[in-house]
Image: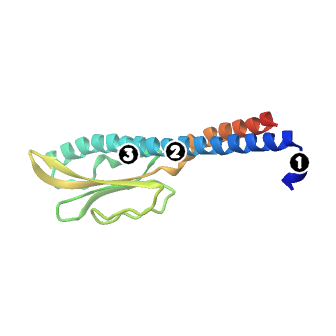
Amino acid sequence: MFKNLPFRWRITLLVTSVSVLSLIAAFAGFLSWEVLRYRAEVADRLERTQALMVERVTATLVANPNISFLPLGDLKDDETVLAAAVYSMDDRIIDRYIKPGTNEVIPGPFRPNVDPNVTTSFKYLRHKGERIGVIYMKADTSGLAQERFIEPMRVMGILGLLSVLGGM
């Protein structure tokens, strides 16, 4: 097939192929880097939200250890948080929050998560060095991922097409 092509077209095909492979490698590297940065940002965001909740819940539990209602409903303003719970030290759920419209289940303390689109976090609640409970939070990251990666993918596709067309 390539024997019948003029030398000029063979060189053009070779240069275009090398350019396309270089662009694919660059795009793959860029996406890999973005995925790593994205996951770190999501974990940081969940950690900050959880730190705020730890302060508020700890203060509430210290003021009234027998309380059954905690300020977890404030999490409804964060679109990524799917579920949250506070456990006593004997693994009893003190209060829970489940985002309306989801069918989340509150797991026992320190159960591992296997879903790559979800970040879970457990943290001890402490007062004066003593553990007084555990807070659990679960955040969905798929919506943020779509928001973050769709536009760069479009730009990469357009740049790839333009480079292929420009090489011809």
Disc 3 crowd rating (10 Å Cα; few below 14, some 14-19, many 20+) is some
Q: Which mark is residue 5?
A: 1
Residue 160 appears left or right of 76: right
Q: Seen in the image, is 155 located left or right of residue 148?
A: right
Mark 3 lies on a secondary structure that is helix
Q: Is residue 78 visible?
A: no
Reading the image, the residue beneath label 2 is 144
Looking at the rendered image, the quarter that the C terminus falls into is top right
Q: Give residue 63's mark.
A: none
Which label number is shown at residue 43? 3
Residue 114 shows up from this direction: yes
Which sits in the foreground, 111 or 19?
Answer: 19
Q: What amino acid type is highlighted by mark number 2?
A: Leu
Query: What amino acid does circle 3 point to?
Result: Ala
**Of callouts 2 and 1, the N-terminal one:** 1
* Front residue of this view, candidates 38 and 97: 38
Q: Quadrant of the N terminus?
A: bottom right
Q: How is the image coloured?
A: rainbow
Using a 10 Å C-alpha cutoff, classify the residue at mark 1 as few (fewer than 14 neighbours), some (14 to 19) or many (20 or more): few
- In this view, 37 is above or below 115: above
